[in-house]
Image: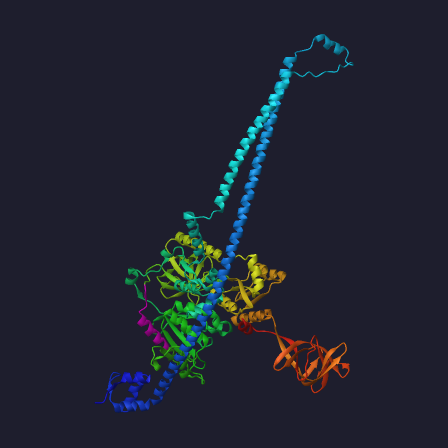
Amino acid sequence: MAKKRRIYQIAKELNISHEEILQFLEKQDVDVNSHMSPVDEQVYDKILSEFAKEKVIVDRYRKEKERQKIEEERRQQEKEEKAQAKKEEEERRLEEARRKIEEEERKRKEIEEENRRRIKESQVKEAEAERKRRIEEEARKQLEKEEEERRKKKEEEKKKQKGHKEAEPEREEEEKPEKKKKKTRTVEIADLEGRLSGRKKKKKKEEKKSRKKSKKEKQVEEKVKKTLASIDEKPSGKKHRKKKVKEEAEEDEDNILRVSEYVSVDDLANQMDVDPSDVVAKCMELGLMVTINQRLDMDTIIMVADEFGFEVEEEVEYGEELLKDEETEEDLEKAEPRPPVVTIMGHVDHGKTTLLDYIRSANVVAGESGGITQHIGAYSVELDNGRQVTFLDTPGHEAFTAMRARGAQITDIVILIVAADDAVMPQTIEAINHSKAAGVPIVVAINKIDRPEADVERVKRELSEQEILVEDWGGKYQAIEVSAKTGEGVDELLESLVLESDLLELKANPNTLARGVVVESSLDKGLGAVATVLVDKGTLKVGDNFVCGIHAGRVRAMHDERGNEIESAGPAQPVRVLGFNDVPQAGDSFVVLEEEKEAKKISAERQKQRREQELRLSKLTTLDEISQQIKEGKIRELSVVIKGDADGSIEALSDSLQNLGTGEVAVNVVHKGVGMISESDVLLAVASDAVIIGFHVGTAPQAISLAKEENIEIRNYKVIYDAVNDIRLALEGMLEPEEREKTIGRLEVRDLFKVPRAGMVAGCYVSEGKITRDARAKVHRNNEIVFDGEVGTLKRFKDDVKEVAEGYECGVSLEGFDEVEIGDEIEVYEIVTVKRTLEQSAEAS
């Protein structure tokens, strides 16, 4: 009995829709009920013959995919082997460097220990000499005091023994003062004995004192020896172990990163003290497409830090426990259906905003600079069936990767726009990657089918190469052919969105404190800090107190996307909120609190925590580092100050400018902020020697006059392409020009002449080009260069000439080279400088 096959099995085998097979069998009058109906071999052969072309295409496609898979595995294996070899080489070099550092550290410690010991010895000697001097001074003072006391005592005893003379002789002496009698000194024997005994006592006392002194000196010397012995001994036991544990703890402390979740790639690189481009490259190796300003979740931070040998300690943001978004039982009980949040993504000029234009029946494109979207727009649209849909329009240019990534993270469904007259472009691939990373369903909209050069099948084929297999090709992704210009297929696209949202069963609790996320932020001249907030759950009302990132505020007013003032906003509704004390960052969480005091406290603590993090990120440059940078020939930097109208645009512009950097030149973003260009921006540019770039913002009159005085350049742009191109030209101007050798002639050596005072002169024939006297020359012999230098003299017969053209003979001498041989070829060239591009610099680095 012949084996019967079911319709869906045959459709799967041919990779076509079962509806096509059913339509074919109906035309052939074959009675089948559904795609589960079995058919016999005769009907199966008819189907195969009808769809043979599709089968061949499918088989070819599968074989090609298999070949590509094998080729990719081979390339991956080669890449892994090269990476392993490179890693081993780096480990070997690191080990050598480590051993060298350890040896230098050991020698340094020995020298320090020796210096410390010498200092101790000198200090002890000085202290001992000072002590001796004090003792001698005290002894001298004591002896003088005792001597004075003895002298006074002796004088009193002498007066008593001698007595007083008679009064008369005294009067005679008074009457005859001119006749002075010569006094004779009487020395008593008792006095002599007293002096002698005093000297003996003094001598004995001094001897006793010296003995005491020598004894004390010995004690001091012994104490000093013990002290020095204890210093020289190595630490041992418990103290040594404590010291070692402390040093190891300090060393481990250096390998620990204290970061909060959603830190940017640039901040993470600064904390690890590595180049941000290395972190981006490492993320790409791990399969993550990131940019310098993109924020990373904690899992990604831990994974990247581990690749660089760091451990991560998560710093919980103040108030996170209080503001944590947890779905309670009350939220589940009171949950109501909410509109879907749909993000439109794709390459630039593929018709994203035009499609949204048609859906909204509003001309949004006319207000965009250069005809491209440069912000994330959030719009709430009511469909014909009464259903609400919130659309997010993200820019398609490559500069807005971070903004597209943010759009994919806050959405429920992604509409991937691909132009039928173009192809799958790099930004289309990025949009696919971001959508897959966010884990959201994708609906493909093939736009511009009204154009004569449209090729829908080519788009589907290129999408399949990116693992987006549409339903027509047996995949799971809906593909709707639309024309944003004529409106063809738009209704079908909206039906697909409604179907996808119904499958997702999107619900939220509107009867709770509101929570949301900042889609875009800006600084309005009249309104101040304004942010577009997409409400996630709850109902946001005028007067609510909120915390947004590090900022706190009170909702003063709310507007929809058309500028109409509203009093409340429910789940999945985008609104422009007024009441921020400063411009928040796009992507910050927006949480409503009951108490204003509590909101301000959380904001103050978070700002304090942010300042501490920024302080840790700041790096001090030492003289050694500056010297090392000079030796290594570090890159030149072009400093810029960026001011823009919206936070997302500033991030995109900063990201694009930093990506222009190469191994020789780079862009250093000194400051970036929202708002018009002010005097403080000009002063900062003066201090850092920077150029000011304004993006969709004006310049204060005081700033203009100050910039003229300080000769600071201010450039304003409305299209991001222009800013990137101008900075590219400036960086290329900072590159050192490349020196190239340009051959201007070739000569054949046919004879040799020895000329007095000129040395060896080669008789040559100019076979190609010409030779000039100020040119350089290379001598080729047996395919080797034996000389490279300058032309000495150039003669034509006996006359000195400046140049000799092709087809003539001449005499040539070379500076410092007399070993020219017959048969040599002389290549004459000159050095020319050629301006280099950033692409050439990147390849060289």
Residue 32, above or below 832: below
Query: Which percent across, then down, holds residue 44?
Result: 27, 89
Query: Which percent across, then down, holds residue 514?
Result: 36, 60
Farthest residue in the top direction? 168
The answer to whether one can see residue 610 in this image is yes
Range of residues picked out in magenta: 493-508
Is-magenta flag for residue 363?
no
Q: Locate the C terminus by quadrant.
A: bottom right
Specify the principal SS of the magenta part.
helix
Query: Which percent across, then down, holds residue 520?
Result: 44, 65
Residue 550, above or below 79: above
Query: Which percent across, then down, holds residue 380?
Result: 39, 69
Count of numbered tags? 0
Q: Which colour scheme is used?
A: rainbow
Q: Which of 355 and 807 is in front in this view?
A: 807
* Figure quadrant of residue 452: bottom left
Q: Which residue is drawn at 57% across and 35% down?
A: 132
Farthest residue in the right direction? 178
Farthest residue in the left direction? 1
Q: Locate the N terminus by quadrant.
A: bottom left
The answer to whether one can see residue 346 in this image is no
* Figure quadrant of residue 637: bottom right
Is-magenta flag for residue 499?
yes
